[in-house]
Amino acid sequence: MSLLSTPFVGTAADTGLHIAATVILIAVVASAAFGFWRVHELPINRAHSRDHHQLGLITALTWIGFVWHWVWVLAVILAFVDIDKAIINLRDTWRHAPQSNPSQHGNQEEKAQ
């Protein structure tokens, strides 16, 4: 057998290997498509599990996200981030921000010395 000859050409093993490669290729493509679909459906599943009040919007954004992918990112943000709680936390953070008094800093520095 020479290094330039191709083994299994024209034999039953050649046909078997082509069939096996075709089956594996179809399985890989199908599993990749299924995995893409499952990841793409994450916002809708999350919105259903939390009884989100914007379920219709998240569903529409998820479907539009198949064409424009940045829209899917908006659906993920809406589904996973509770906007109401985030706004309340932000408001409370600004409301209860510590007030710095310049005279107190000077007194603390004198006490430290």
Image (cartoon, rainbow, N blue to C red):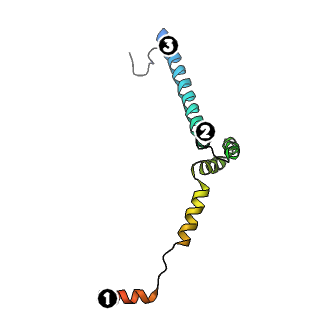
Q: Within 10 Å of the Cα at label 1, are there few (<14), some (14-19), or many (20+) other Cα atoms?
A: few
SS at badge 3: helix
Q: Residue at x 64, y 51 (%)?
A: 74
Residue found 66% across the figure and 43% down from its top: 62
Whole-number angstrom distance, CA of label 2 to CA of label 1? 60 Å
Query: In the image, is 109 to the left or to the right of 18?
Result: left
Amino acid carrying mark 2 in the image:
Glu
Image coordinates for residue 75, horizontal then vertical, percent: 64, 48
- SS state under label 1: helix
Q: Percent position (x, y) of residue 37?
A: 60, 35
Residue positioned most to the top: 12
Left or right? Give the position of 101 relative to 44. left
Q: Are marks 3 and 1 in contact (CB under 8 Å)?
A: no
| Residue at which label 1 appears | 111
Q: Are marks 2 and 1 in contact (CB under 8 Å)?
A: no
Please state if 6 lies on the left or on the right of 35 as rendered: left
Residue 57: x and y in percent read 70, 46
Q: Residue at x 60, y 51 (%)?
A: 77
Amino acid bearing label 3: Gly
Crowding at dot 3, Cα within 10 Å, few <14 / some 14-19 / many 20+, comes out as: few
Q: Quadrant of the C terminus?
A: bottom left
Residue 41's disc is 2
Seen from the viewer's position, the closer of residues 12 and 97 is: 97
Q: Which residue is mark 3?
A: 16
- Residue 11 position within the rendered picture, expressed as x and y whole percent measured from the top left: 48, 9
Q: Is residue 98 above or below residue 16?
A: below
Residue at 69%, 41% in the rendered image: 63
Disc 2: CA contacts within 10 A as few (<14), some (14-19) or many (>=20): some
The image quadrant that residue 102 belongs to is: bottom left
Mark 2 or 3 closer to N-term? 3
Which badge, 3 or 1, is on the more N-terminal residue? 3
